[in-house]
Image (tube, rainbow, N blue to C red):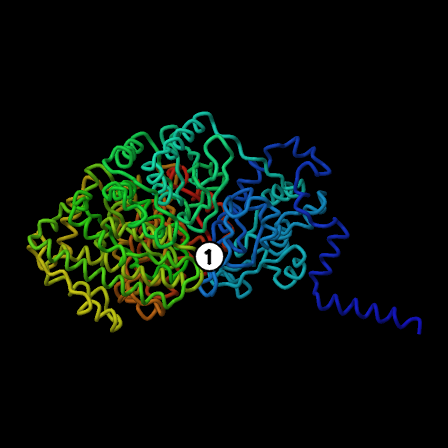
Amino acid sequence: MSSTPSFFFKACVITFFIASGCATLANFSLDDKFGDADTTNRDVSTATDTSFNTQYPDFFTQEAKPIIESRCVVCHACYDAPCQLKMTSVEGIERGANEQKVYDGARLIAATPNRLFIDAFETQQWRERDFFPVLNEREQTRAANTQASVLARMLKLKQQHPLPNHKLLDKRFDVSMSREQQCPTIEEFDQYAQEQPFAGMPYGLPGLTESEDKTLMTWLEQGARMPSVKNMSSEERSAVDAFELFLNGDSLKMQLSARYIYEHLFTTHLYFSEITTSNTQPQFFKLYRSSTPTGQAIKVIAGTRPFDDPGVERVYYRLQAVTSTIVNKTHQPYAIDKKLMDKWEKWFINADYKVNKLPGYAPEVAANPLIAFEQLPEDSRYRFMLERAENTIMGYIKGPVCRGQVALNVINDRFWVFFVDPDFVDSPKLNAFYASQTENLRMPAQEESTALASDWIKYAGRQSDYQQARNKFLNDNFENAEHLRVDAIWDGDAQNKNASLTVFRHFDNATVVKGLIGTPPKTAWVIDYVLLERIHYLLVAGFDVYGNYGHQLLTRLYMDFLRLEGESNFLAFLPPSERLKEQKSWYQKAGDELTEYFEGNVDPFTHPSGIQFSTTDPKQELYTKFKAHLKDVQPNSYQLSTSELKENSLALLRQLNRVNGKGASILPELTMIMVESNTSHSPEIFTLIRNSAHYNVNSLFNEDDNRDIKNDTVTLVHGILGSYPDAFLHVNESEIAGMVADVERIRSELDYTRLMDKYGVRRTAPDFWSFSDKLHAAYLQHNPVDGGWLDYNRLENR
């Protein structure tokens, strides 16, 4: 009898352990060995042995950080970092990981934002938000610092189970963007390692060298100490103070202007070009709203959107140094210099207008810039965005909305962008018309982050009413066609290279660059002030990556109308007889609803333009006229002529632009080609971009059914274009002829495999990392301001 309770107790304990799983056992084991986990254990003052960190104070910066950047950051950065583990900063590494996906187009309720440097600042705050540590947070000993660290265990797992010696990854590896996340805590790690022995880090790529592994393990053993960031230089501090003094003027005019500037630059990386040393990466800064003025510590106002109610009587706009590693996919460099500040002063301070009262932050006001900033001169607002038009559009491309095929299948794979001249916009009649349309031009962001899909109906109705009213206004006022001449297109004031842009879509990501790149595309946009402003407030300022399904769907559907508007502006320059015909060719196999919209629901603009056409192909003729108009502001960037390769080598490479149809469709979205030249110490980098043709881009789903493969093309540029390479080719200059011939012969997957066998650097290649290092070295050397680390999450496995 006396043994029964003991037996019963043991049985209950065993049952409890089985029910709780191995994680509980592991947790007890770690607690027994190394004590309870506590974020305060990461404090350097609690370490049992500080001699190493005293002897090597810069070990992290000089030894560990370069490896983390080149081997870890290339996958772990931004919102799409696996398990939200951002290794671009000390704060991101300390924050740790979270299994919840940021990009989730199916959630019914908006998620809580978890943005570094905005929503929480202390490690304990992140633990309360369900982020778990990847570094040891138990007692600080060598054994604990490796055995109780997810990061150390991931590295060890990779060393124990390196990539199989195969050309392609087998079924044990899933490198697709839709793969299920595996985010083990340290308590779950033993079971994770047992079930997925080949899931060590770097995942699906070669492991670190013995030397690199030793360096990181030494850093981890010694407590993974990461020193605080260096202070700004006196020059930088003076520049920051002067910039903040300008933005935080007390007049109503300046307060409203500063709000406008902030809401357009909050995603950018600002830098002071006049104190930046050439050929080095400058110190970048982010612009934040703060409840404290210059001279006091910044207290970030953490609104979901830049126009959310700040909850304080006075907002101050402050610059904070960017301490994170610069990654290309989020990098929007924006130079601040005296010339620019003089323009801002002219547009916002010295312009003849009055601000009688500051607008509020109610969503129906703040989400619509045409209402919130109606007191600012429209000409000033438009010129502000045009001055750095690439950055304005880049907010859409590199902002949070850019991730995901459904977010980007609203645009064609390559198109050109032109802008209406500001002198044309500054028209009393036109301004009065836009003022009359504020109700129709309301933005979906006023529904905030949890919207209903049915909200689409009212916004579609408003947009239809606006388009009807707009075409009536154009028909009534443009009958003499004096405004629809070539010189109605902004020429960059004869010196600004932002006057034209090329946008490339790469399925679920995109790129925008200055200039007209490649052959004349299928479609083009002409953007005026109101369209440019709405694109920004729809896709950048008003978009919440943590929003629910309804918010994301409403944003995507509304963008259909903005695209149609930009395309219609371009078509208006063509002869009236060509407009609908050309538009129908862009929307083949479109649904009945769109066809009705084209042919009946909205009265078209019917007057002729002021351009005389003399050929049977007016669209191509129009492109030629626009290019001639903008020839003085076309940048050399990405032109093959900027390469130092021999002319016959460049002639061979130019032949790649002839690849089309089936052959083009087999190529990846982005192929980066490194050419080793016998006459140069530095390799030459080229990017081969696939342009996937579509019958139309008006369908939300089933994109494959809309693919027009026979019209696929490619564009070859000099330099790195894009943030997410899919494939790498590595050739000597003497091999260019053979490589080009092999690309031209591609008609099947087998042909592509043969190309990769001869010239490819696959993700499984033993020399992958040395190639990667060489690629980045060349890229960052030639692009110290615009360049950043690439992202390898889309590297193919074929």
The quadrant the C terminus occupies is: bottom left
Query: Which residue occupies the extreme right position in the image?
Result: 2
The answer to whether residue 584 is left or right of residue 325 is left
Q: Residue tagged by mark 1?
A: 546
Rendered view: 464 above or below 59? below
Rendered view: 348 above or below 661? above
The answer to whether residue 89 is left or right of residue 451 is right
Q: Which corner quadrant of the image does residue 212 belong to?
A: top right
Residue 118 x/y as whole percent:
50, 46
Q: Secondary structure at mark 1?
A: loop
The answer to whether residue 604 is left or right of residue 460 is left
Rendered view: 765 above or below 787? below
Residue 455 x/y as whole percent:
36, 65
Rendered view: 201 above or below 174? above
Q: Amino acid at mark 1?
A: Tyr
Q: Residues within 10 Å of mark 1 (few under 14, many from 20)?
A: many
For image coordinates 23% across by 66% down, the residue present is: 587
In terms of depth relative to the viewer, which is nearer, 282 or 337?
337
Q: Is residue 235 visible?
A: yes
Residue 387 x/y as whole percent:
27, 40
The quadrant the N terminus occupies is: bottom right
Q: Is residue 745 visible?
A: no
In terms of depth relative to the viewer, which is nearer, 600 or 411?
600
Residue 494 x/y as whole percent:
19, 37
For image coordinates 61% across by 56% down, the residue present is: 161
